[in-house]
Image (cartoon, helix red, strand yellow):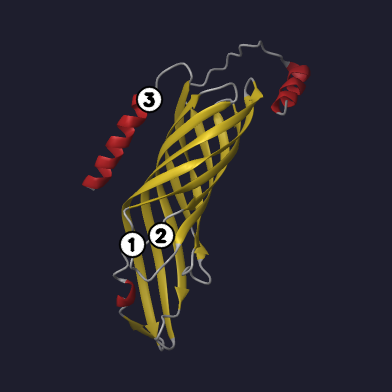
Amino acid sequence: MKKIFFYSAFFILIFFSNASGQFVRYGISGGINKTGLFGADKPDSYNKKTGYFGGLYLDNRIGEHLSAQSEINFSLFNFEFSEPVPLLDNSLLTVNEKDYYLSVPVFLKFKQGYEFIFWHIGLGGQISLLLKTDRYLSLTVNNHDTDPVYYYDFENNNYEYGFIGNAGFQFKALDVFVRYYISMRNIYKNGQARDMSFNTLNFGLSWQFNYKSESPYGRKTGWTGLKYKIKHLFK
């Protein structure tokens, strides 16, 4: 628990130290994710179980359509699989693993729209610090329960990193987005028998606290205004 509080306090302090200036927007975000696996030793089949993420974000505008967004999120990567154990006939090992991370995505975001309707896309990276791992194991051999000691010594890496792609649609202060993340680091430490990494598909919402409804270009209302806004989404 001390590690969780230390990491959280450290990143939140850095986060809010940058939350100033007229070009900075900030708020909260969260949603669900589906955790996938890839790599040479990934299971032949597995369950993409539902996890979650949530935290704070900063969006710093650096151009007319370009901004740099950073976040701090608590994330759960959650997966489950069953497979035979090598050299054990008639065996079935079931692994249900929940990995809790403090994740920091940072990416450049291109934003296009008018007044209060926008679409956006973004590319960047993410680094995550492992806070906790819950691993539930069961092993049967010839239909008898056996101690799954085979998997006990698998130790997770303390951090992992990778690339993210982001796309979404913003209406006033509300943003709806989808995000794909692919890890560049193995889940388990070097020397372990398992070579596999995460990829996740996230579906999220965010709410901007300091949204400003004023438009520097004047406001067009009614049917004419709606057509103008839609036109400027792609102009």
**Amino acid type, mark 1:** Lys
Instruction: Kindly report which numbered mark, 3 or 1, lies closer to the viewer in this rendering.
Output: 1
Q: Disc 3 marks which residue?
A: 18
SS of the residue under disc 1: loop
Residue 234 x, y percent position in the rendering: 72, 29
Q: Secondary structure at mark 3?
A: loop
**Mark 2 lies on residue:** 186
Callout 2 secondary element: loop
Q: Callout 2, which amino acid?
A: Asn
Q: Residue at x 42, y 66 (%)?
A: 195
Tag 2 near tag 1, CB within 8 Å? yes
**Residue 129 x/y as whole percent:** 34, 48
Q: Is residue 64 above or below residue 34?
A: above
Which quadrant holds residue 172? top right
| Vertical side of 40 occupied by 88: above or below | below
Residue lying farthest left? Answer: 2
Q: Quadrant of residue 156?
A: bottom left
